[in-house]
Image: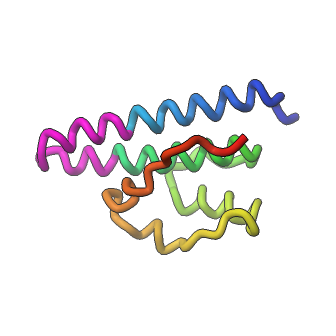
């Protein structure tokens, strides 16, 4: 059963709040210098993963409990191939490069 739009929107916003928190924490650590590089990379990876999960929830695409960005991208592109074209080589980029893909807006409703 698909949740109603209000509930769906709430779930997506919960994921996006987590994304914002991860990016905010990463930015704070960046301001402190290179000492926290590994933690910053982890937070950026988590933010990208959570953003993809927000998109999957928004489009009501089920996904397994995973931290594998490539698997999440695959779910999204397989479910909506005409809408989501993705170069899977992007998943091989460093987490620092992935952080530059920070979303500036929420998914369209």
Q: Which residue is more in the foreground, 101 or 69?
A: 101
Segment tinted magenta in the rendering: 23-42
Count of numbered marks: 0
Q: Does the magenta segment cover residue 15?
A: no
**Is 78 left, or right, of 30 in this rendering?**
right
Expressed as whole percent of the image width and height from the top left, the position of residue 65 reads: 59, 44
In this rendering, position of residue 6 left or right of residue 72? right
> Is 29 a magenta residue?
yes
Question: In the image, is 63 to the left or to the right of 95?
Answer: right
Quadrant, the N terminus? top right
Q: Residue at x 54, y 63 (%)?
A: 70
- Residue 86 x/y as whole percent: 59, 69
Q: Position of residue 13 (x, y in %)?
A: 60, 31
Give the vertical position of 4 relative to 76 (above or below). above
Q: Quadrant of residue 100?
A: bottom left
- In the image, is 47 to the left or to the right of 36? right
Where in the figure is residue 19, as x and y percent of width and height?
47, 38
Compared with 92, 4 (above or below) is above
């Amino acid at each position: 059963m698909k949740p109603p739009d209000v509930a769906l929107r709430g779930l997506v916003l919960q994921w996006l709040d987590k994304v914002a928190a991860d990016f905010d924490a990463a930015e704070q650590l960046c301001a402190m210098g290179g000492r926290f590089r590994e933690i910053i990379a982890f937070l950026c990876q988590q933010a990208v993963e959570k953003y993809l999960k927000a998109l999957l929830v928004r489009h009501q695409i089920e996904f397994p409990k995973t931290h594998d960005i490539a698997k999440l991208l695959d779910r999204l592109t397989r479910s909506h191939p005409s809408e989501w074209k993705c170069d899977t080589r992007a998943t091989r980029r460093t987490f620092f490069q992935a952080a530059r893909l920070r979303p500036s807006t929420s998914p369209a409703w």
